[in-house]
Structures are given as C-alpha cells and as structure tokens.
Image (cartoon, coloured by chain):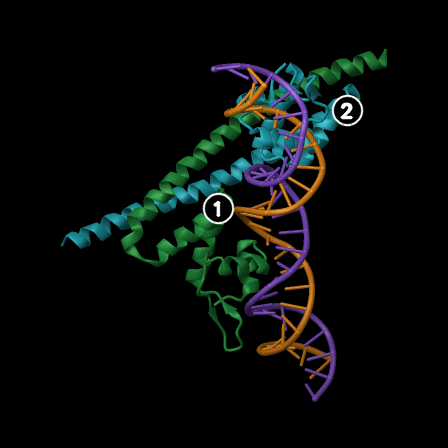
Chain colours: A green, B cyan, C purple, D orange
Amino acid sequence: MYTIHEACKRTGLTAHTLRYYEKEKLLPNVSRSAGGFRQYTDEDMESLAMICCLKNTGMSLQDIARFMELAREGDQTLRERCELLERHRESVLARMEEMQRYLDKVTGKVDYFTEKLREFEKNQSK
Amino acid sequence: MYTIHEACKRTGLTAHTLRYYEKEKLLPNVSRSAGGFRQYTDEDMESLAMICCLKNTGMSLQDIARFMELAREGDQTLRERCELLERHRESVLARMEEMQRYLDKVTGKVDYFTEKLREFEKNQSK
DNA sequence: TATTGACTTAGAGTAAACTTCAAGGTATAT
DNA sequence: ATATACCTTGAAGTTTACTCTAAGTCAATA
C-alpha cells in the first residue's frame, strides 16, 4: 500500500492531479485507510503507469478514462482494448513523423540563420 | 496578395484562428483592402509557415509571438533567434525521444494484450 | 496534550488556445 | 436593386487539464 505522497513520487504527478484523476474516473475506487486517507495498491500503481504512458503519448483524459473503464470490465474487453491501443499507437507514430518533418524545417532555418548571421557579422566588422 | 480564405487553405488554420493570431501579435500588421478586408503578402505567408512550424513542434503562442517580434526587428536579432531556435530544436528532440520510449511501452502492452486475448478466446471456444 | 503539517472534500479559479456571437459592412450574382 | 454569402470588430463563451481555496480531520512529535 502506498500513500498519495508515494504515488506522487513514482508517477511525477502532484497530489492535486492524482485526486483530480480519481474524480475524472481515470482511477476511481482507490481504497481509504481508517482515517480516510488514500491507499494505492500495486495494481493501482500499475494502472497509474499505464495512465501516464497514455497521457504522455497525447491521449486525452477522457479517452484514458474510457480505456481504464474497459480494463475494469475484464477479459471481455481485451479485443476492444487491443484495437484501441493499436489505433493509438498508429496515431502517435503518424504524429512523430509529422513532428520530424517540422523539425527538419526548423533545422533548415537554424542553418539559414547561422549563415545569415555570419554574413551580418562580417559586414559589421568592416 | 491572398485573401484570408486562401491563407486558410495554405496553412490549414481557420479564419477565426488567423484573426486570433493577429490579435495575439503572432502576425500583426496584416494590410487591408479598401473595404477593410485582410490581404496577406507572400512574406506574410512565409511568416505563417514559420508560425505553423513552431506551433506544430509544440511552441506556445506566446513564445512564437516573441520570436516573430524578434524577426521584425531585423538582423540585429539574428543571433538571439538562432540560439532560441536551436534550444527549441533540442527540446523537440528530447520530447520525441521521450515519446518513443512511451510508445515502446504501448507497443509492449499491445503485444501482451494480443497474447492474453488469444488465450482467452481459446478458453471461450472450449 | 498541543501544535504542526499533511490529508480530506466540494467547489471555485486559472491558463492556453481557440470558438462563437452580435451587429454591421462588402462583394457579387441575378 | 437586392439577396446571399463572406468579411469586419470587440467581446463573451468553451474545452482541457489542471491548480488553488476553505473548512475541517488525522497523525506524529515535542
């Protein structure tokens, strides 16, 4: 069992954010101690890792909530989750390729500016 | 000279967004026709291409506005723009590498789910 | 036992990037 | 000439993902 503080450390999220994710049904049903404090199980920590993975590849919290709901429904939803994840994977790949193309343009600009800068400084020094 | 509609087609942005970017100083000083309609020059279109490039690699509109302001100040800001762009380039590269790591995890999950699904369906058919 | 600090909740507030609205002017096809 | 579609503005509204606040509870330490 982990406290919210430990869950923060492991995920890099703030306690505020963890509570927010709970409210938004990304990871509902986190159990409480006698005093009402959150207790994260190992399974919860695994779910959080998955949540971060999806979030950091650009999935919306709403879509993550939907995915986690399917996960809670068990093996009946395996096919659906598989397909969903595969579609996500392809969209991430496409986004990365697009990003690479834009990055190449940025690199081209850096080179162009560097050349222009050299000329500018040559003129300045005259 | 291009109408706002043509500028939309070339950039993939909506007219709303182009007006918004003007208000936010990403590309201020777009000239108007006698009737008050926007007229984008070739130079404006180049600036828009740069704006999209920076935006699509994750730069905030505020930072883009700052960059475009420097560009309007001319050759004196070449060094600053060069450095700024180089830093941006490196942060994009870092983000892409992070993304790739998360994507590998997603791929691992897809494989895991595929295997689990095969087993599940084998049991179902019995 | 008292105090300090972290936890709880519901709900309000914030920032970024649009997006829509209302009221009116412009261009063009019939 | 007039209807229709598109343009103008300033301002208000929306969405996403937090982030903070207030009022109160709980745990640990001097």
Rendering coords of residue A126 (x, y %): 86, 10
Give the foreground label among 1 and 2: 1
Q: Position of residue C16 (x, y in %)?
A: 63, 41
As drawn, A77 above or below B43: below
The amino acid beneath tag 1 is Ser
Q: Nearer the viewer, residue A18 or B91?
A: A18
The residue shown at (57%, 33%) is B93
The residue singled out by tag 1 in the image is A60
* Closest to the observer, B4 or B109: B4
The residues bearing labels 1 and 2 have C-alpha atoms spaced at a distance of 38 Å
**Disc 2: host chain:** B
Between A118 and C16, the residue placed more toward the observer is C16
Give the residue type at disc 2: Thr
Q: Residues within 10 Å of mark 2 (few under 14, many from 20)?
A: some
> Residue at (43%, 56%) from the top-left corner?
A47
Circle 2 sits on which residue? B77
* Mark seen at residue A16: none
Disc 1 is placed on an element classified as loop
Along the viewing direction, whichever of C4 and A24 lies nearer the viewer: A24
Q: Is residue B70 left or right of residue A51?
A: right
Q: In the rendered view, tell whether residue A81 sits above or below residue C10.
A: above
Number of on-image labels: 2
x then y, percent, for residue A30? 46, 65
Quarter of the image holding residue B47? top right
Q: Position of residue A36 (x, y in %)?
A: 52, 74
